[in-house]
């Protein structure tokens, strides 16, 4: 696991030590009061610290330390927060509508974070060796260029052969493939559906084409492979970006509800 | 595909700007985005491919190389770009979407919280954003829209109330009336508990600070002793222990089936810092004579009875049958299994010996010189034929007293005279006799009332035969022994020869008991002679061979100079009020094979006398079953926290 | 099109002269001085007349005795001609740094950095055109009186340091200006001195069009370069002054490749055909001396299969070919070169002949460690280094290297870059890839910054103290010379806009462009924001030479700045 590498072990050891200290404290006989207030405030502080990670991204002009250290702290803090959360609520699932909502959001943030980090560990290596590296924002232009070249090939083929067989077939089947990224999840999981689809359709068309048209078909097959590479980049990069659509808004809602919880606790629970 | 060189060439590959909020709508449709891109406000700016430049009279296309160089159409005659494209609808970038969704999530959360906080009708209770979870079954009858306010005073108190409540745990605490009189149902209600229940504001700050929720608990729940002291009354005087409050241990809203009173070991250990992790391994051992170490308990040596007396052939017939249960009644008792009464247990052997020990209250002593003239006696007592007959006509020239005894220790104390040396006591005794001859027993009773009995004097002389006593005085004054009318008189008060005695006392005889109690309870007199005389009297009366042999079994406690108390009842262990034990589950579980002797065994060695001849029960006896992985072994199996828990009267009244 | 587009006058070379105080009268005076008078003005092309160069690319600066003219280690883009008085060049030892009054890099303060949070524009490439006008007005109106740092105790300096005097008509500073290397010595005014400071662009024109200046510059250049190299090379550390002079007298000079090597290299990159690298020393021949690289890069290679296998690459200060000569001298047996040395682009080398070494150097020299060239390693281990050399990435001192196995493509680096540059990124997160290593399109702050060649206004320059190559946006005219020069396509021209987002155009309606690139956050706190902003430690700014060393000894995983 990359976050647990040689340089970040102090953070993880620190988090473990913090949790051990917490457990010792929590079970210690020196408490003068129910520990839930204290653990609650600790948890609130920790969650706010975790949320500040997003602020660090916006304040990159300030010398606030390396973002990689922040990420390690974010990860270790997240794991610590989950442990602290369980200590705080003394259960896995609380009672009461607002607390259940809060717990649901908290778990949502945890799960989305874990999934996101899993994606970050899993996908980059595959992206790096998936052929053409393309900046995400440039994928539409890339696809458009490929499409234009495919259509140029089709037009040339039609001009040469005087037949619209190829063109019609393109519109009916291949155009679907070249229109936009396809086989999203197959690409994410490293499946072969795109290759098979393309091969099957090109073979089907090939039967009905003249020899001259087949040279264009071969060129289109190459472009199809190029397009598939772009699709692979698109699928994985999109996933690497999109998981945050769960993590960040859930965290925002969770923080909001946590503040409400804090108010309620102060007003009612003492 | 974009060629490799184009991809990197500085003039074909512009900066990507992921910080922008909008992207070209064409890119969203997987078409080539225009170079210019949307404006900061998301308005399409890419309608024209270029801004043609005037070249003389004509216009020149200036589409950049990055866009594909000059276009085929070329500019129009008016200089307008020939590649006019319909404007696109720019799309928000992903980062902007995520920001909007986040804001929306916050807004929706706030809206939902506000909506569900306001919408409080009963049907929606489970969806209320204030809902902290269901109450336990015992409290679950606090229902209804305003029921929260029963405990949570901030409920419905408006923004001001919430504001106060947020910042102070004491604000809005229920203003209880002074609770004296309302705690009538609380056993051992004491002024201290009344104080504790009083409004926190009235108390000095810090001493017993009350959170408003704890104050709400004690609206209904009362305890023996102060409510906010550890263990209520047990540590009432320990100033070093800080106040406690209910919320330290009790939580609510943990579900209907949750037990509010169920506590964890950790909660005990939060104060009891000598942590007992495991009962079997780390609980301190029980006291040396546990559980037979009640100092006021009636003396009974199980070992000698079972070992010696019960096996003696002579007494075998009188031994109660059935071993332990011959004496102990195993019924529905829980904590202690008491022996049955004296008559069914001890009387068969010990009943007779009680009757043998009379209580000699007063004895007319030997004197050297009689100052009571014969005519005085005659005048005061009248002349009985008998007496006259036996009386000598003239006093003998050398006086020889009829009594050769000293006064009893009790009478010496009563009269304030020494018990030895007739010269010292003969005058007060003869004065008494003179007074009794003329006034009956009243002077004697007055002395008793004065020095012993006080208000209880009536009980001391229950069934006292005043006339007989007077006649005994007359007889002695006449230097004769009083001869009661019937020698075989029944038990009770009687005068016999020179004595005033109480004969043939039975077990639990009220008169003997009253005398023993009264004398034991006397404080040491100020006068040293009196003190010494009382000590002698006390010693005689409270000795094992004293009247009725009471003290053979019953225990007197208190300072030897008095006042002392006598424990008549069998006392079983009660010193540790915070511990509990129930025989019932043990008897049921152990079954017929396992009798009392599983735990209670004869013997006990050196401490045998203190433990009634039983082997003390040690920790090991309990841990045989109560241990981790076996039978429950947490603190609360045996220990209780609260003392004297009861509902307050007001709560019951309110309920009506 | 938008007829109300904001307009400005298209900037031209010499719009911003070197010093606006220079007047035609000054030029007249200059033209009469002997050094200038000897210049053949007729050789200059019509659009770059000599007078124009003097007026716009030079200025007259006055110094009081003790004033420091330039400091050792400075990056400077100008040379000086002594008009009157005299200056002293401090040869050795160097003056202590504090005596030179080193200026700290102007960094933003914490609050200054923070203000970027709200001052950064959401509109790309916004410029305040008022600012350009103000700058132009200021520079024209500004007086020539500059503040100088002066040496407190000149006699002590003269006493403790070896110095030489330069008097009227002599030139100095041209090494740094032309060789794009740091100033090699500190120069201070000995008497009241007037100097003609010629910026590099002007110097280049003089060098190109006037044979007299060309000879003067070349002679100075070679003499001073030699001394600089010999003094700093440990090989000659044990030599007495006389011996050193003797060595210096016999050293040979040669320059390989074209001064504008990047042009042919870029063509090669685009056409894919590699030109022949000039051979400096060939493998298998009898060694004729030790080569010392003074500027540029050279490749050490050995024949492997049908091609040359790179063993190392040499940059300024490195030497080549000592071992064989030493072995030969030691054993008395003739030796042959084991490797060959070829020029990568422009290389300036000195050759110390074998007999000179044998006479002056070897007797004092402790036996050098045996050569540790890794010929036994599998070629795959060297592939990364080979690639770096092939791509000329060895030039970079701040290569943006991204580990694609770690990079999650979050663009945090680009966003961080934008946040420190007014909302505009200054690099593109793509580039050439070797295995999982991507060298992104970000300025590498090259050792040999070819981008600076040809900038007509000097807008692109080495930062005074940090040595980072930066572009002065105020003086950039958007000609694109630097962008076209950069072999790595790391400079981009952007169309600027006013704060409302409208593109700024000239009178013809054409957009005004500015050259932009990474400035290594020279004004920011905490160094390059991109490397700091990477949550996965995937991005680092590394020096290519350490990178090659790393790559040659370990797998590239050790790449670290």
Image (cartoon, coloured by chain):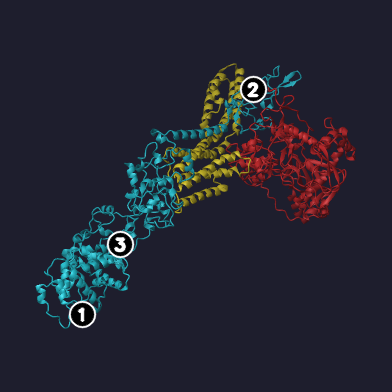
Residue A218 location (% of width, % of height): 58, 25
Q: Specify few, some or many for label 1: CA neighbours under 10 Å numbering under 14, 14-19, or 20 or more.
A: some
Q: Specify few, some or many for label 2: CA neighbours under 10 Å numbering under 14, 14-19, or 20 or more.
A: some
Chain ID at mark 1: B
Which of the 4 image quadrants contains residue B463?
A: bottom left
* Element at label 2: loop
Q: Report the chain shown in cyan.
A: B
Left or right: A253 with respect to C491?
left
Q: Which mark is residue B369?
A: 1
Residue C452 location (% of width, % of height): 75, 37
| Residue identified by numbered label 3 | B294
* Nearer-the-camera pick, A64 or C241: A64
Left or right: C22 with respect to C491?
right
Q: Which image quarter is the C terminus of chain C in?
A: top right
Which of the 4 image quadrants contains residue C521?
A: top right
Camera-near label (3 vs 2) is: 3
Mark 2 or mark 1, which has the lower sequence index? 2
Mark 3 or mark 1, which has the lower sequence index? 3
Q: Report the chain shown in red.
A: C
Q: Report the chain shown in yellow.
A: A
| Residue identified by numbered label 2 | B47
């Amino acid at each position: 696991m990359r976050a647990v590498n040689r340089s970040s072990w102090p953070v993880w050891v620190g988090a473990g030590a913090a949790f051990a200290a917490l457990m010792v404290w929590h079970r210690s006989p020196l408490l003068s009061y129910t520990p839930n207030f204290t653990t609650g405030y600790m948890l609130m502080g920790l969650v706010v610290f975790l949320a500040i990670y997003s602020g660090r991204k916006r304040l990159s002009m300030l010398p606030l330390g390396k973002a990689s250290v922040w990420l390690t702290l974010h990860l270790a803090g997240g794991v610590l927060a989950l442990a602290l959360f369980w200590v705080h609520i003394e259960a896995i699932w609380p009672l009461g509508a607002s607390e259940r909502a809060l717990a649901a959001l908290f778990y949502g943030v945890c799960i989305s974070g874990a999934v996101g980090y899993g994606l970050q560990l899993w996908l980059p290596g595959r992206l790096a060796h998936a052929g053409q590296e393309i900046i995400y924002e440039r994928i539409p232009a890339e696809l458009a260029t490929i499409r234009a070249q495919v259509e140029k090939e089709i037009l040339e083929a039609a001009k040469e052969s005087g037949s619209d067989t190829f063109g019609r077939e393109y519109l009916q089947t291949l155009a679907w493939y070249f229109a936009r990224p396809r086989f999203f999840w197959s690409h994410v999981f490293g499946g072969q559906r795109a290759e098979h689809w393309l091969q099957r359709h090109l073979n089907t068309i090939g039967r009905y084409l003249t020899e001259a048209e087949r040279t264009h078909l071969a060129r289109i097959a190459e472009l199809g492979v190029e397009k598939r590479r772009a699709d692979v980049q698109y699928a994985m990069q999109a996933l690497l970006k999109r998981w945050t659509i769960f993590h960040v808004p859930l965290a925002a809602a969770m923080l909001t509800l946590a503040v409400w919880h804090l108010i309620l606790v102060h007003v009612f629970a003492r | 595909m974009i060629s490799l060189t184009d991809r990197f060439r500085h003039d074909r590959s512009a900066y990507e700007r992921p910080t922008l909020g909008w992207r070209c709508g064409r890119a969203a449709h997987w078409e080539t985005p225009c170079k210019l891109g949307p404006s900061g406000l998301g308005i399409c700016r890419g309608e024209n491919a270029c801004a043609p430049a005037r070249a003389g009279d004509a216009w020149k296309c200036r589409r950049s190389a990055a866009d594909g160089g000059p276009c085929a159409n070329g500019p129009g005659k008016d200089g307008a770009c020939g590649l006019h494209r319909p404007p696109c609808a720019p799309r928000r970038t992903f980062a902007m979407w995520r920001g909007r969704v986040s804001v929306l999530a916050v807004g929706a959360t706030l809206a939902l919280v506000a909506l569900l906080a306001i919408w409080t009708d009963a049907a929606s209770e489970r969806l209320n954003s204030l809902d902290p979870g269901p109450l336990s079954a015992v409290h679950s009858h606090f229902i209804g829209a305003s029921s929260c306010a029963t405990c949570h005073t901030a409920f419905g108190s408006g923004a001001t109330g919430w504001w106060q409540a947020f910042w102070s745990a004491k604000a809005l605490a229920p203003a209880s009336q002074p609770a004296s009189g309302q705690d009538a149902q609380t056993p051992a209600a004491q002024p201290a508990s009344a104080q504790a229940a009083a409004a926190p504001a009235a108390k000095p700050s810090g001493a017993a600070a009350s959170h408003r929720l704890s104050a709400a608990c004690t609206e209904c729940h009362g305890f023996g002793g102060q409510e906010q002291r550890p263990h209520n009354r047990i540590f009432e005087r320990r100033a070093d222990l800080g106040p406690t409050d209910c919320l330290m241990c009790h939580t609510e809203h943990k579900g209907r089936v949750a037990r509010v009173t169920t506590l964890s070991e950790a909660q005990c250990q939060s104060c009891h810092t000598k942590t007992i992790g495991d009962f079997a391994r780390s609980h301190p051992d029980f006291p040396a004579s546990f559980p037979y170490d009640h100092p006021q308990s009636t003396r009974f040596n199980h070992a000698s009875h079972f070992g010696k007396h019960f096996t003696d052939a002579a007494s075998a017939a009188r031994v109660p049958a059935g071993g332990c249960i011959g004496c102990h009644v195993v019924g529905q008792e829980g904590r202690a299994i008491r022996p049955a009464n004296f008559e069914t247990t001890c009387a068969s052997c010990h009943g007779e010996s009680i009757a043998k020990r009379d209580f000699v209250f007063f004895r007319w002593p030997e004197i050297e010189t009689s100052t009571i003239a014969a005519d005085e006696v005659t005048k005061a007592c009248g002349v009985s034929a008998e007496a006259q007959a036996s009386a000598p006509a003239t006093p003998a020239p050398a006086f020889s007293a009829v009594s050769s005894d000293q006064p009893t220790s009790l009478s010496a104390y009563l009269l304030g005279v020494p018990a030895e040396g007739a010269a010292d006591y003969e005058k007060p005794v003869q004065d008494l006799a003179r007074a009794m001859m003329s006034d009956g027993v009243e002077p004697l009773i007055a002395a008793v009332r004065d020095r012993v009995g006080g208000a209880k004097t009536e009980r001391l002389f229950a069934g006292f035969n005043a006339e007989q006593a007077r006649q005994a005085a007359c007889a002695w004054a006449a230097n004769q022994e009083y001869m009661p009318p019937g020698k075989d008189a029944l038990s009770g008060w009687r005068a016999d020869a020179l004595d005033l005695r109480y004969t043939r006392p039975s077990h639990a005889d009220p008169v003997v008991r009253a005398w023993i109690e009264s004398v034991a309870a006397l404080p040491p007199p100020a006068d040293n002679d009196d003190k010494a005389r009382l000590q002698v009297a006390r010693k005689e009366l409270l000795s094992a061979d004293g009247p009725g042999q009471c003290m053979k079994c019953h225990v007197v406690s208190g300072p030897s100079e008095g006042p002392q108390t006598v424990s008549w009842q069998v006392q079983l262990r009660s010193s540790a009020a915070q511990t509990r034990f129930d025989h019932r589950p043990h008897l049921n579980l152990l079954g017929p094979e396992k009798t009392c002797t599983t735990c209670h065994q004869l013997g006990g060695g050196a401490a045998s006398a203190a433990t009634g001849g039983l082997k003390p029960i040690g920790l090991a006896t309990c841990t045989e079953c109560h241990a981790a992985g076996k039978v429950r072994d947490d603190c609360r199996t045996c220990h209780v926290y609260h003392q004297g828990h009861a509902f307050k009267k007001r709560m019951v009244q309110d309920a009506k | 099109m938008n007829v109300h587009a904001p307009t400005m006058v298209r900037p031209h070379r010499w719009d911003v002269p070197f010093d606006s105080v220079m007047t035609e009268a000054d030029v007249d005076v200059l033209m009469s001085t002997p050094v200038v008078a000897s210049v053949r003005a007729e050789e200059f092309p019509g659009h770059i007349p000599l007078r124009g160069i003097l007026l716009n690319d030079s200025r007259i600066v006055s110094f009081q005795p003790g004033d420091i003219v330039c400091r050792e280690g400075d990056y400077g883009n100008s040379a000086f001609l002594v008009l009157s008085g005299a200056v002293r060049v401090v040869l050795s030892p160097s003056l202590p740094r504090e005596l030179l009054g080193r200026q700290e890099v102007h960094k933003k303060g914490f609050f200054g950095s923070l203000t970027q949070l709200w001052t950064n524009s959401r509109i790309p490439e916004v410029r305040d055109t008022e600012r350009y006008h103000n700058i132009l007005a200021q520079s024209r109106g500004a007086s020539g009186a500059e503040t100088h740092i002066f040496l407190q105790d000149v006699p002590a300096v003269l006493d403790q340091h070896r110095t030489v005097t330069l008097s009227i008509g002599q030139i100095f500073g041209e090494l740094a200006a032309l060789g794009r290397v740091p100033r090699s010595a500190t120069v201070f005014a000995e008497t009241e001195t007037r100097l003609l400071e010629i910026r590099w662009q002007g110097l280049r024109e003089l060098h190109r069009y006037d044979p007299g200046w060309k000879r003067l510059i070349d002679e100075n250049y070679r003499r001073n370069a030699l001394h600089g190299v010999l003094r700093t090379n440990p090989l000659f550390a044990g030599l007495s002054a006389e011996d050193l002079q003797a060595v210096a007298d016999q050293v040979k000079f040669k320059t390989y490749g074209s001064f504008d090597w990047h042009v042919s290299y870029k063509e090669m990159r685009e056409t894919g055909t590699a030109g022949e690298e000039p051979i400096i020393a060939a493998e298998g021949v009898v060694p004729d001396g030790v080569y010392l690289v003074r500027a540029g890069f050279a490749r050490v290679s050995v024949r492997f299969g049908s091609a040359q296998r790179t063993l190392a690459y040499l940059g300024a200060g490195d030497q080549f070919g000592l071992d064989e000569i030493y072995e030969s001298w030691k054993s008395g047996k003739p030796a042959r070169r084991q490797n060959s040395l070829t020029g990568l682009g422009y290389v300036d080398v000195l050759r110390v002949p074998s007999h000179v070494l044998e006479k002056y150097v070897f007797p004092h020299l402790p036996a050098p460690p045996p050569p540790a060239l890794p010929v036994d390693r599998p070629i795959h281990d060297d592939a990364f280094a080979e690639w770096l050399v092939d791509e000329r990435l060895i030039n970079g001192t701040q290569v943006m290297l991204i580990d694609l196995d770690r990079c999650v493509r979050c663009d945090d680096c680009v966003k961080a870059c934008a946040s420190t540059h007014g909302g505009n990124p200054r690099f593109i997160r793509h580039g050439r890839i070797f295995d999982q290593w991507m060298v992104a399109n970000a300025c590498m702050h090259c050792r040999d910054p070819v981008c600076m060649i040809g900038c007509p206004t000097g807008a692109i320059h080495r930062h005074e103290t940090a040595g980072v190559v930066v572009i002065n946006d105020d003086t950039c005219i958007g000609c694109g010379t630097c962008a076209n020069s950069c072999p790595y396509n790391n400079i981009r021209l952007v169309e600027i806009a006013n704060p409302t987002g409208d593109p700024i155009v000239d009178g013809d309606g054409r957009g005004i462009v500015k050259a932009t690139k990474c400035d290594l956050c020279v004004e920011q706190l905490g160094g390059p924001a991109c490397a700091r902003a990477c949550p996965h430690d995937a991005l680092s700014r590394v020096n290519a030479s350490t990178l090659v060393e790393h790559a040659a000894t370990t797998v590239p995983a050790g790449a670290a700045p």
